Amino acid sequence: MKFYWTMPQPLVPYYQKELSAYRMLWEKGQVLEAWRHLERAHILGQPYPIEHTQVHWMMLLFGFKTKNGKEIVGQLPRLLVGGVKSWAGVIPVGNTGGANVPPLRPMAIPEDLKQILDTKR
């Protein structure tokens, strides 16, 4: 078992880019496109407790903003255990983090993110 804490510095700009894209698209009212960037930030941040928890917090807020009860309820347990699972290195790789997918299901990583993860870790 490998323990993680901080995101490697080369990954940080890619993670921040996804969060910035989320905010920009949200402000433009492009809700579905904004959500996609939260999912991408989740994939990048999932192995690291702070970033993983941050994305789940933002997903919870998204649920409140969109009045999506399923998302609100689905994010609560993810907030409680997501960071711990990251720290312990036991995450479902590629999972997009939303309540629309089972929290323990591994998923395929989009090719562009896979390349980033392979070269920047």
Image (cartoon, rainbow, N blue to C red):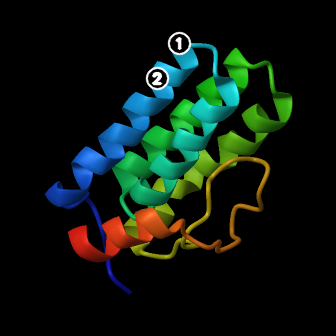
CB under 8 Å between callouts 1 and 2? yes
Q: Residue furthest front?
A: 112
Residue 28 horizontal side relative to residue 32, left or right: left
User: Does 22 sit above or below residue 120?
Assistant: above
- Residue at 49% over, 69% down: 111
Q: Residue furthest bottom?
A: 1
Image quarter (top left, top right, bottom left or bottom right) of the C terminus? bottom left
Q: Residues within 10 Å of mark 2 (few under 14, many from 20)?
A: some
State how many labels appear: 2
Q: Residues within 10 Å of mark 1 (few under 14, many from 20)?
A: few
> Which residue type carries mark 1?
Glu
Return the mark for residue 27. 1
- Residue at 40% over, 55% down: 45
The residue indicated by pointer 2 is 23
Mark 1: secondary structure = helix
Q: Evaluate whether residue 121 shows in this view.
A: no
Estimate the spatial distance between the alpha carbons at disc 1 and disc 2, rounded to whole Å. Answer: 6 Å
Residue 106 horizontal side relative to residue 86, left or right: right
Mark 2: secondary structure = helix
User: Does 39 sit above or below residue 48?
Assistant: above
Residue 118, how many percent across, how many down?
Answer: 32, 76
Residue 120 horizontal side relative to residue 82, left or right: left
- Residue at 70% over, 20% down: 64
Image quarter (top left, top right, bottom left or bottom right) of the N terminus? bottom left
Picture quarter containing residue 44? bottom left
Q: Evaluate whether residue 81 shows in this view.
A: yes
Residue 104, how many percent across, how many down?
Answer: 69, 69
> Which residue type carries mark 2?
Arg
Residue situated in front as seen by the camera: 97 or 73: 97
Residue 24, how many percent across, how many down?
Answer: 45, 20
Residue 74, how many percent across, how many down?
Answer: 75, 44
